[in-house]
Image (cartoon, rainbow, N blue to C red):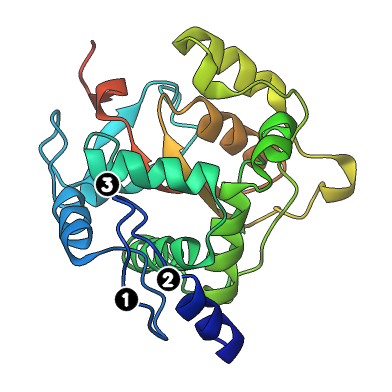
Amino acid sequence: MSFADLILKLVYPPRCAVCGELIEATADRVCFCEKCRSLWEQEKETPCPVCRQTPDNCICELQYNKSRTLDTCRSLTLYDGDAVKKLIFGIKNTSDKDLFAFIGRELEMLIFRKADLSDGGCVIAYPQRNRTARKKYGHDQAYLLAKTVSKDLGIPLFEGIKNVHGKEQKKLSERGRGENAYKSYVIPEKYKGQLSGKRVILIDDIVTTGATAVSCAALCKLDGAVSVSCFCVAKTPRRFHAKGDPS
C-alpha cells in the first residue's frame, strides 16, 4: 500500500465489507472486522447440503453442466449465509481495492490447491459483465478479480469472452438464464485461436445455475482450450444436484 493510500485511510477510515462497522486503518489490506472475518472463515467450512463436502471439495454438478462441458467448478463458499451474501453484494456494487485484493488472494490459494499450474499452459479468463451493469455500477467485478489473480499468479489474462446481449442474469428465470447466457457471450474474431491448447481458469463472483460458466466453457473449447475450470467466490447450493442423482 502506498503512503498516499495509507493517509487516505486515516482521513476516511475503512469499514467492514460485511457489517459496515469502522475498522482500524493499517498498512495491511483489511476489509473485515474481527467478527465478520470469523463468520467468513466459518462459512468457507459450511458443508454443501447435498454432498456434505466443503465448497472447495463439493462434488455436485451444475444444473446446466449435464454435458460436462465445464470440467470443474470450485468455490470459496456457498451462497447461503448472511456474511457471504453481503460480501457478494459489495463485490457487485463497489470497486473497493482492499475487498478485491482480499478476495483475489482467497481465490489464488484455492487455485493453487485445485488447479494444475505445472507447465505454464494456463490462462485466466472471465465472463464480461453486461454493458448495462458496467455502466450502472462503474466496474466489472469478474474482470477485477481475474486481473488480480492473473497479476499475482503470473498467469496471462484472456479478455476475449465478451458480453454482447445485455440482460442481467439475476433478473431471469432458470430457463431464461440458460437462453440468455447462450446468446450473450462470444469470442470476437480478433481473439480467436488464443486459447488453443490452453487450460482455462474461469473466474467469477457467483455461480447460480451454471448457465454463464458453461456457455463460456463451450466457447473456450470451440476455440481450442483443452479444459475449462471455474473458480468462484460462491455458488448456490439449492441449484445443484449430486453426480449420479437423476433428480
In the shown orientation, is residue 124 left or right of residue 25?
right
Specify the farthest residue to the bottom. 3
User: What's the CA distance linking mark 1 and mark 2?
Assistant: 7 Å
Question: Which of the two discs, 3 and 2, labels the residue nearer the N terminus?
Answer: 2
Q: Which residue is mark 3?
A: 77
Q: Which residue is mark 1?
A: 24
Say whether residue 162 is visible. no
What SS does tag 2 mark? loop
Q: Are marks 3 and 2 in contact (CB under 8 Å)?
A: no
What SS does tag 3 mark? strand
Give 22 or 240, whichever is nearer the viewer: 22
User: Residue at the location (25% across, 29% down)?
Assistant: 237
Q: Looking at numbered disc 2 in the image, what kind of residue is underneath it?
A: Pro
Q: Which residue is mark 2?
A: 13
In the shown orientation, is residue 92 left or right of residue 189?
left
User: Residue at the location (53% across, 76% down)?
Assistant: 152
Q: Looking at numbered disc 1 in the image, what kind of residue is underneath it?
A: Glu
Q: Is residue 179 above or below residue 18?
A: above
What SS does tag 1 mark? loop
Badge 3 density bin: few <14, some 14–19, many ≥20, Cα 10 Å:
many
